[in-house]
Image (tube, rainbow, N blue to C red):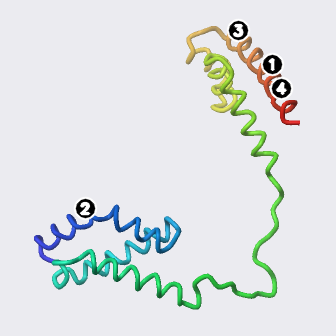
Amino acid sequence: MNPDQQRDFTEFVTTRSDSLIRLAYLLTNDQHAAEDLLQTALAKTAGHWRRIRDNPEAYVRQVMYHEQVGRWRSPRWGRERLVLTPPDRATDDRTHEVEARVTLARALRVLPARKRAVLVLRYYEDLSESEVAKIMGCSVGTVRSQTHQAVARLRELIGETVALEA
C-alpha cells in the first residue's frame, strides 16, 4: 500500500469505525467478538484496498457478514465437547465475601473524611501510626484515637446494615 492509500485507509477506519463496530456487535451480540470481527474485516480490507477504495464500506460489511456466517457454520462454534471427566471444578460460594466488602464500602462512605483516611492509611496501605501521623500532619495519639473512633463507628454502621438486611 502506497502512502496515499495508507492515508485513505486510515481516514476510512477513523471515520467509519463507530458505525462498523455497531454492525459487528449486532452480528455477534458480544463486544469482544465484535471487535475481533471488525479487526478481521479491516485486515482483509487493507489487503484489497487498491481494488475497493471507491466503495470500501460495502466491502467491509460483506466481509463481516461472511466471517460471522462462517463462524456460525463452523463445527467448533458454540458446540460443546463431551469428555469423560468435567474440566470445571466446583468452587465455594463466595457471596458472603462480596456482601461483606459491599457492606464495608458503604460504611466507609458514611465516615468523615479524616477517619476514613486514617483507616485507609493504617489498614489498606499498612502504614504505621507514626507514618500516618506524618502524612496527616498530626500526632500519633491523634491517629490512635481517630482509628479507635473510626473502627467503633464502622462496627456500629455494619451492625445497623446487617440488622436492616435481616
Mark 3 against mark 1, which lies toward the viewer? 1
Q: Secondary structure at mark 3?
A: helix
121 left or right of 30?
right
Q: Which residue is mark 4?
A: 160
Mark 3 against mark 4, which lies toward the viewer? 4
**Residue that appears at 70% across and 29% down:** 123
| 38 over 155 or under it: above or below | below
* Precedes in sequence: disc 3 or disc 1: 3
* Precedes in sequence: disc 1 or disc 2: 2
Q: Which residue is mark 3?
A: 141
Q: Which residue is mark 2?
A: 15
Q: Secondary structure at mark 2?
A: helix
Q: Amino acid at mark 1?
A: Ala
Front residue of 25 and 100: 25
* Precedes in sequence: disc 1 or disc 4: 1
Q: Amino acid at mark 4?
A: Glu
Disc tally is: 4
| 7 over 102 or under it: above or below | below
> What distance separates the C-alpha of mark 1 from that of mark 4?
12 Å
Task: Tell me residue 61's x, y (percent).
Answer: 34, 77
Dot 1 and dot 2 residues touching (CB under 8 Å) = no
Few, some or many C-alpha atoms within 10 Å of disc 3 (few <14, some 14-19, many ≥20)? few
* Precedes in sequence: disc 2 or disc 4: 2
Task: Tell me residue 130's x, y (percent).
Answer: 64, 17
| Marker disc for residue 47 | none
Q: Amino acid at mark 2?
A: Thr
> What distance separates the C-alpha of mark 3 from that of mark 4?
29 Å
